[in-house]
Image (cartoon, helix red, strand yellow):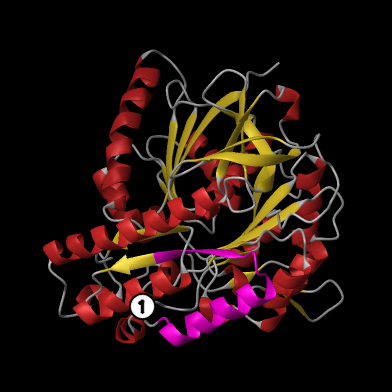
Amino acid sequence: MTEPKKLFVKTYGCQMNVYDSQRMQDVLAPLGYQPVDSAEGADMVILNTCHIREKAAEKVFSDLGRVRKHKEAKEANGGDKMIVAVAGCVAQAEGAELMKREPMVDMVFGPQTYHRLPEMVARANRAVGRNRIVDTDFPAEEKFDHLPEQVSKQGYSAFLAIQEGCDKFCTFCVVPYTRGAEYSRPGADVIREAKQLVAHGTRELTLLGQNVNAYHGEAPNGGEWTLGRLLRELAEIDGLDRIRYTTSHPRDVDEDLISAHRDLKKLMPFLHLPVQAGGDRVLQAMNRKHTNADYRDIAARLKDACPDLALSSDFIVGFPGESDKDFEDTMEIVRDITFIQAFSFKYSPRPGTPASAMELQVPEKVKTERIMRLQALLAEQQLVFNQKSIGKEMDVLLERRGKYEGQLVGKSPYMQPVHVSGLPESALGQIVRLKITEALPNSLGGELVDATRNDQKSERNVA
């Protein structure tokens, strides 16, 4: 019997990359590759990279230095060749530089070409000398058409990519250049994959896309499904108890989607809806194509449809030309709307983006002062929301063991980690009713109210 080959995949960045890494494992499984937890002794190492954060490429080169030591040790001891690959958005944007700076890298491929991994691996294995492979095309449709129909088990909560790419061209963002144009998967394919995941034990699905609510997939009987229609179809799947989606753009929130938040009990009352900034002048410079007033109106309509809905957001502080007044507009919209979670960053230029060439770059000291003020306000809002949860009852999906003996950790409908003691490990994968007894800045503690529930009652979960 042939020994299985060891595959180590390190995932950087966004949830889409987590999904892609899982699908890479599915693609390579027929070749005998099985995932392992370390690069040491691996037959293949894939670094699935993200280009959103500052100095993303440098972090990849740092990790490649550590991988090089494992590769040299494996091959020096008479072991088989270790194939080293760099995938994802850094590979897409800087593939030539990666090959130039790191000779031990065997393969560089973008986020739209990993369905061709078997061919790439075959070429790398049969090569005489160095046969380095670069594949950074943009065939999004082809990729999804050629991925294995069968998906492997992901867990009680799983990701499912339904949309890729971006046509928005925000001036600070590299995604249109690394992920390509917007593409939506056919509705039938999404439903089939969702049913497979549920059959493997998944109870919660998070639908993924760079602009997920721009989804316009082909309907099974012709025409198109919006995201709202797709959500309604998914809600009919027996055994699927919770549905989420991310990341959304304010421009693509339509009435169909808002009504889904009103009508679907399985759709969690939590939405990540990035505003990025509060000042209209900055929003225009970012090419967001929504205003402060637009965002406020969308938030109000969503909360009117689903009064329990809570929002999270993204913020960029110190965008070129941002004045004190512009920043105060950001602080004001945060105070008025309130966000229970948020990602906030100081602006840093991304090579090749329009904003990187803009004048009036904000001094680093000013950006630091502003981000500290914003993050303090956001942290206060998150803690207040958590503290207001004390005494309420929530349905919590138990997903993993906790730090302490006899402790399990789950996820509230609002994405808060919730820990509970005194339940057996057999409760993992169950949705249990907990009364919240403790609130920390980033998590909650609870105690059991009812026996494990397997019904599909409302998870609007504020009793």
Q: Is residue 154 visible?
A: no
Can the viewer see residue 357? yes
- From what the image shows, is residue 185 above or below residue 430? below
Residue at screen point 57% across, 79% down: 300
- Give coordinates of residue 335: x percent, y percent: 39, 70
Q: Residue at x 29, y 71 (%)?
A: 352
Figure quadrant of residue 211: bottom right
Left or right of 228 in this view: 327: left
Residue at 49% from the left image edge and 85% from the top image edge: 294
In the figure, 195 relative to 352: above or below? above
Q: Where in the figure is residue 286, as x and y percent of width and height?
A: 34, 79
Q: Which residue is mark 1?
A: 278
Q: Which residues are magenta?
A: 288-314
Direction from residue 47 to residue 400 in the image, left or right: right
In reply to whether residue 3 is colored magenta, the answer given is no
Which residue is nearer to you in this view: 414 or 159?
A: 414
Residue 376, by quadrant, is: bottom left
Give the image location of residue 414, x and y in percent.
Answer: 59, 54
Residue type (three-letter) at the residue carrying disc 1: Gly
User: Label 1's element?
Assistant: loop
Furthest residue in direction front, as rendered: 391
Q: Assess disc 1: are there few (<14), some (14-19) or many (≥20) residues with their C-alpha within 10 Å of its C-alpha.
A: many
